[in-house]
Amino acid sequence: MNSTQEDGSTDTQKRKVHPLLILALAAVFVFSVFGVRDLNQPALANLAALSASASFAKGEISSNDAPSQEFPELVLVSNEALKASTPPITVTSRVLGAIIGQVDSDTRPEIIQYEVEEGDTLASLAQKFNVSINTIAWANDLQSTSTLKPGQDLVILPISGALHMVRPSDTLSEIASWYKASAEDIVQYNNLASASEIFTGDLLVIPNGIMPKTLPQGRLTPVPNSYFIYPIPSPHRITQGLHPFNAVDFSNGICGDSVYAAAGGTVQRTGYTSLGGNYVRIIHPNGVVTYYGHLSAILVSPGAKVYQGQIVGYTGYTGYTIPRGPAGCHVHFEVRGAENPFAK
């Protein structure tokens, strides 16, 4: 028989209450232990990764224990801070895609660069690349009778015709008329979505185009000598003077040197070509475009605003460089729409 307490409850009722309380307390305990542990796992993992990367940078971890180079590594800077690093030797298009979210592989027919060998002539190269003699001459500012020198760099178009660098205010219909070519052929051959899809600084192959004797003048933007800063740190050594396309090469003799925006502006394009490698193009408020090629890593994306001196990438040897490999690390710096102030 159950005995009745002063509050009217029975011993049986009290025995029913206690197990529920125990279960509730157990549930709270389990959640507090295992739930917090799970919540902290990402933070702990990140902390462990940071610690491992710092140790690797200090040489405390062997190369066998190093993180996979398919991901950006963290390196110690001045023993105080960590920054992402992508060694030029290990960077691939897939890795760059992971870093910047996208890499626009330029699907347009590509221009190549050729180093003249002993015995080469414009006629022999025209036959070799199945283009006209004038195509090679026009693209390289030569005469059809010019003599080539071994070691000379030439731009070779993928088809007979001409090459046009789009300037501020150029329209496709104008370009077609200047080169006596078809606007439809230009759109199709350059994989343009429409006739309006051209931007200042674009290089357009003009199929079967004829180089005009003169182009309309007055479209080069005057730029003060102080407008652009050097695109790499001091001593910002120039390794090659003016060459296609209104470019100057800079290198301090190392890979992974910072590459700066020469002036403030908006990132117009980023991507990869077999000639220029990983590249960044910036359009500036005055309509001038600057191009930074052969980068080992790209740190900006199209549409981003950049300020003068901001790091947009690192020097490398992607694309076509002379020499090949780490010895060819540099930045190919072009000014499109104005004079290159660093030309010698």
Image: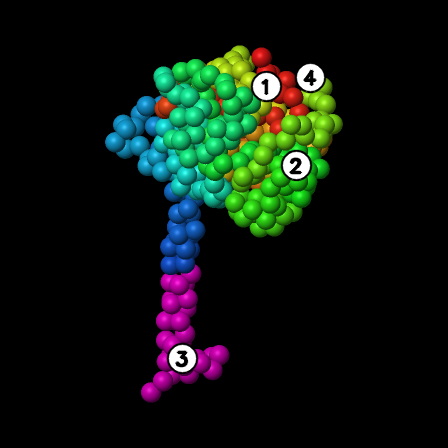
Which of the two discs, 1 and 3, labels the residue nearer the N terminus?
3
Q: Tell me the SS state at disc 2.
A: helix
Q: Residue furthest left?
A: 64
Q: Which mark is residue 225?
A: 4
Residue where numbered disc 2 is placed: 178
Residue 341 at what x, y percent from top left? 63, 18
Q: Residues within 10 Å of mark 3 (few under 14, many from 20)?
A: few
Query: What segment is highlighted magenta in the picture?
Result: 1-28
Q: Type of residue at label 4?
A: Asn
Residue 154 at what x, y percent from top left? 47, 24
Image depth: mark 4 or mark 3 in front: 4
Which of the two discs, 3 and 2, labels the residue nearer the N terminus?
3
Q: Nearer the viewer, residue 274 or 99?
A: 274
Q: Tell me the SS state at disc 3.
A: helix
Residue 280 at what x, y percent from top left? 54, 33
The image quadrant where one finds the C terminus is top right
Q: Residues within 10 Å of mark 1 (few under 14, many from 20)?
A: some
224 versus 217 height, above or below: above
Residue 202 at what x, y percent from top left? 59, 36
Residue 235 as seen in the image, left or right of residue 130: right
Q: Tell me the SS state at disc 1.
A: loop
Circles 3 and 2 in contact, beta carbons < 8 Å: no
Residue 119 sits in which quadrant? top left
Residue where numbered disc 1 is placed: 230
Residue 119 as seen in the image, left or right of residue 197: left
